[in-house]
Amino acid sequence: MQHALPSRRGIAYGSGMEQVPHILVVDDDREIRDLLARFLERHRLRVSGARDGREARRLWPNGHYHLVVLDLMLPGESGLDLARWMRGQSDVPIVMLTAMGDETDRIIGLELGADDYVAKPFNPRELLARIRAVLRRAGEPVEQRVERGARPLLFGGWTLEPARRRLLNPEGVEVALTGGEYDLLAALVERANRVLTRDMLLDLLRGRQAGPFDRAIDVAISRLRRKLEDDGRRAQLIKTVRGGGYVLAAPVERS
Amino acid sequence: MRLLLWPRSLAARTALVLLLSLTVVQVAGLTIHALDRIGLQRLGLARDIGVRTMNFYRVLAMTPPEDRASVLKELTPTPGLHARLSEAPPPPGGLPPSPPTWHHLVRSNMNIVGLPVTARPHEFLFYGGPADERMVIGMPLPEGGWLSVASDVPPPVPWHSRTFLIAFVLMTLAAAVLTIWAVRRLTTPVRTLAAAAEALGRDVNAPPLPEDGPTEIATAAAAFNTMAGRIRRFVHDRTEMLTAIGHDLRTPITRMKLRAEFMEDDEQRRKMLADLEEMEAMVAATLAFGRDATSAEPVAALDLPELLRTLLDEAGDARPGSPAALCYEGPQRLTIRARPLALKRALANLVANALNYGGGARIRLAPPARGFVIVEVEDDGPGIPPEEIDRVFEPFHRVENSRNRETGGVGLGLPIARNILRAHGGDITLANMPRGGARATVQLPA
């Protein structure tokens, strides 16, 4: 689906390149827009603000945005409609601000092609970490770029549903995962048959998970193996690579 | 004694009363019928005996004395009747004189047979009667000698026909069956009403009662529906209000979190963010409480043991380094159908309570029995004060010793859990264990 469109401007964030990422913040509260702009600018990002869909569309041609932070609860045109419109325009990464606990909007947003979400009221640092992670992903070289999307991923009979952040066993029964386990499994499945070192995994998961997860990748892997009924010593799905890394050894299909 | 026989249910009581009256009426009817039959049979018997005895007399009285013996022999023998000639009046033969009512009855029937005035017997002897099942009538014949006629007096038969009895029993049975059917039918609305009241207690959005049937029932159903509507509106308004407050608080909390980032004093910023997290948790709980009443999450198959273990893992991850005892006991795999996110929230609340108040959580899952699975969440804490145990499910109620920062909470964890579980067709109860600690018992349809 997603080709390496020129509009999805890869920028190697933090690699010393001159270009400062330009973020469009769409939120109806002026104070939040201003405070968020100040906060993000302090962290070396350039920010424009729009109060609703109309203003966002008006500003759209002016800036070459690297990322959009979009509040789904907007007056007038809904955030989801705006996200759909933006997807029609370009491949720009979108981080949604969703209503706390409103799973429906979140699922639809991810299915529309939004890249990530943060529940509102958000922690500014968490939002910053997500923005950086999404920018970094968008900046990966084309050949390494992970195809992202909301479509379910099938591997070894199991199904991972990114939109609902859930895992289904071969019988279609949901098997619960902690947030960290889901992110870890998603990282492995999206990069199936590629060896991921512990450092790479930590890097990929930063922003989503805080402190304790750093020390617990091995624990999470062993829990995942149990849940995937993948015997630790003769693991078939998640294999341990000597020298500290893991690989998901199974063909992955997008349904 | 009376209490033992008096059934509890309205249907059974009504049926019992109706069946008892039916029995009384039937017994009375049968008795009247039997008495009537006995009276008729007595009359018939008296006429029979009287007329036949008189017929013998008439034939013999018109026969010259010397021929009487031979004529008597030629007369057709009659079953149950035995005539004899003698010179002297017949002896009682062990029989008492007939009771006057019986003897008058037989005597009056003897007058039916016509006789010339001169030939009429001028004397009658009556011995025996129905009580002796035999009687003897003695009469002097004209021109000397006596005729005595001994008759059987068979006891009366109140009902001689078997079909009558069978028909009667069938009729009674049919009436009983109809009575029970009708009573059950008539009391169904009462049961429906009770079931509806029960359903309303569990879910304010339970469907309304049908307002049909007999007038009284329809009126009751309409009144019930009106009441349910008022309760629903009240709950809805309150929920709307809570949700609106929750929504509106999100913007200021977000602003404050952003502002905190501009505070110079790291210590103060950390504290401010902690306060805001707490507020956010309260808002989140309030929103969750408001939302669960109208949960629209689809039902899906999920593995319950894995969900429970994941909850324990998450609780353990969130408290790194704490020695909290977390353990799961039960089957490795068990698929149930539920709303995954809602169920997870409900069970997570129970685990959080166990950890916050009890310092540990033991989860036990019992395999399905009688259509339900049972999940028990136990802790080793001080338990719940007995006077509080009925109130823990009230929204915003907190057990007294939990009103401090460490255990925190808004007092919505258990109400949310109960709303969710009841919406699943299950339930939750909370109790103290004899050896200390509290136990939450969750019942879920298997």
Image: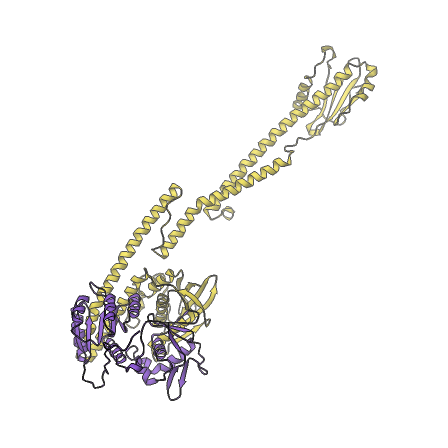
Residue B18 location, x and y as percent?
50, 40
Residue B39 location, x and y as percent?
62, 27
- The tally of labels here is 0
Quarter where residue A243 is shown:
bottom left
At x 25%, y 59%, the residue is B241
Considering depth in this image, is B72 or A191 the residue closer to the camera? A191
Residue A240 shows in the view: yes
Quarter where residue B431 is shown:
bottom left
Specify how the rendered protein is coloured: by chain
Quarter where residue A247 is shown:
bottom left
Check the picture and name the quadrant holding the C terminus of chain B: bottom left
Drawn colour of chain A? Answer: purple
Residue furthest to the top in view is B118
Considering depth in this image, is A178 or A62 the residue closer to the camera? A62
Residue A149 location, x and y as percent?
31, 73
Left or right, A232 with respect to B65, comes to: left
Q: Which chain is yellow?
A: B
Considering depth in this image, is B445 or B1 the residue closer to the camera? B445
Q: Is residue A53 above or below residue A187?
A: above
At x 38%, y 60%, the residue is B422
Left or right, A39 with respect to B2, comes to: left
Residue B261 shows in the view: no
Residue furthest to the bottom in view is A243
Left or right, B163 with respect to B369, comes to: right
